Amino acid sequence: ETGVTQTPRHLVMGMTNKKSLKCEQHLGHNAMYWYKQSAKKPLELMFVYNFKEQTENNSVPSRFSPECPNSSHLFLHLHTLQPEDSALYLCASSQDLTGEYTIYFGEGSWLTVV
Amino acid sequence: AQSVTQLDSHVSVSEGTPVLLRCNYSSSYSPSLFWYVQHPNKGLQLLLKYTSAATLVKGINGFEAEFKKSETSFHLTKPSAHMSDAAEYFCVVSLPNSGYALNFGKGTSLLVTP
């Protein structure tokens, strides 16, 4: 248990659906992240939030829309996804954005787009 | 450009024998370096980290890694492998010139045989 909780753990959605992934951290951290893990590829950073403000958007298509209502919660809204978007989506948090702090990961949400 | 390279995509060892997972990084700045482990269907767990203190870093579960600036390496070792060590291992670098974003290697899959 890392203190970072992701729901749902598994999601199957059609290409025309709208769904959301949720992440919650109970660690009192100020920074939160979304990563994408695809087969045979390195983890890709998607978004970074620090004190609820987005500080990084790593050229992610607009069909992925993040939302950070407060420092403890992070959402990833999904709309008109493609089959190649099927992957494990990992949420993470850290005390701050400096390299000194450990980043803690949730167990991920497995997304399958059909 | 890839800033972290894991030299082996798969490593197989016998239970009770030493483990060596190799990682090289490229950076003109002083990096922070991490090793994370991912067991099947689980999120990433921090094994150890180097942040400019002692060059030999001890982590959880008997793992350790040595930062060698002259070789730009941060190899992960363990004297004696256990069956439970079978997992995917990621070498990660955090660079100050990239906002301390984590750059992941492609991962090394460790297989431990009886």
Image: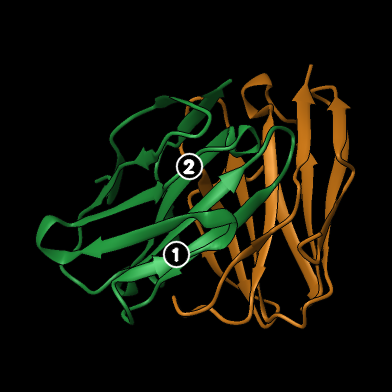
**Could you tell me which secondary element the residue under label 1 belongs to?**
loop
**Could you tell me which secondary element the residue under label 2 belongs to?**
loop
When the figure is inspected, residue A112 is found, relative to residue A50, above or below; the finding is above
Please name the residue shown 35% across and 40% down the image.
Answer: B20
Please name the residue shown 77% across and 78% down the image.
Answer: A71
**Mark identifier at residue B80:** 2
Labels 1, 2: one chain: yes
Relative image position of residue A101 (x, y in whole percent) = 53, 78
Residue toward you, A46 or B93: B93
Toward which corner of the image does residue B99 lie, by quadrant?
A: bottom left
Outermost residue to the top: A114
Is residue A91 rendered to the left or right of residue A47?
right
Disc 2 residue type (three-letter): Ser
Mark-to-mark CA distance, 1 and 2? 33 Å
Relative image position of residue A11 (x, y in whole percent) = 86, 32
Please name the residue shown 90% across and 43% down the image.
Answer: A8
Q: Which residue is mark 1?
A: B101
Is residue B55 rendered to the left or right of residue A100?
left
Of all chains in the rendering, the one displayed in orange is A
How many callouts does the rendering have?
Answer: 2
Residue toward you, A32 or B76: B76
Q: Residues within 10 Å of mark 1 (few under 14, many from 20)?
A: some
Relative image position of residue B46 (x, y in whole percent) = 58, 59
Q: Nearer the viewer, mark 1 or mark 2?
A: 2
Disc 1 residue type (three-letter): Ala
When the figure is inspected, residue A20 is found, relative to residue B112, above or below; the finding is below
